[in-house]
Image (tube, rainbow, N blue to C red):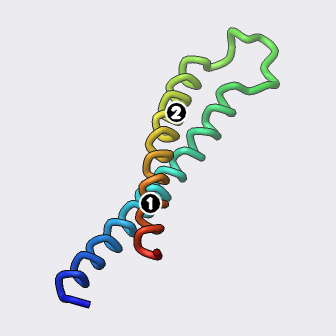
Amino acid sequence: MTPEFNHELAVFKGQLAELKQKFNAEQLEAHANETVVRNFLNPYISDITDLSVDQAKAAMDRLYNLWVEMRKRKETIDRLEKDLNG
């Protein structure tokens, strides 16, 4: 292998590691938002007007945005892993 190829390989591996780290951080945040949504939409509150729907919507909007970002990031991770591993 040439030094240039080794450098490119190291760059790709670094990108992959960074993408995985971001994905894991997003996954933690997504799970937290999922829990927040569930807590705001407490099924044991009988009066629907007492639910924190506005706060649940804000958490759900963030969860949706994370989901979109994570799907894109996962595709990139899968592609890089395939390219690196042959």
Quadrant assignment for the N terminus: bottom left
The residue tagged 1 is 79
- Kind of residue at badge 2: Tyr
Q: Which mark is residue 37?
A: none
Q: Residue at x 28, y 78 (%)?
A: 10
Nearer to the camera, 54 or 69: 69
Nearer to the camera, 4 or 38: 4
Q: Please say if 63 is above or below 53.
A: below
- Kind of residue at badge 1: Arg
Q: Residues within 10 Å of mark 2 (few under 14, many from 20)?
A: some
**Residue found at the far bottom of this picture:** 1
Q: Secondary structure at mark 1?
A: helix
Quarter of the rendering containing residue 19: bottom left
Q: Please say if 36 is above or below 19.
A: above
The x and y percentages for residue 49 are: 68, 9
Nearer to the camera, 61 or 41: 61
Q: Residue at x 38, y 67 (%)?
A: 16
Query: Which of the marked residues, 2 or 1, is nearer the chain's N terminus?
Result: 2
Q: Residues within 10 Å of mark 1 (few under 14, many from 20)?
A: few
Q: Secondary structure at mark 2?
A: helix
Drawn side of residue 2 relative to residue 19, left or right: left
Q: Residue at x 18, y 88 (%)?
A: 3
| Residues at marks 2 and 1, CA–CA distance in whole angstroms | 23 Å
Nearer to the camera, 46 or 4: 4
Quarter of the rendering containing residue 9: bottom left
The residue tagged 2 is 64
Quarter of the rendering containing residue 76: bottom left
The x and y percentages for residue 13 are: 35, 74
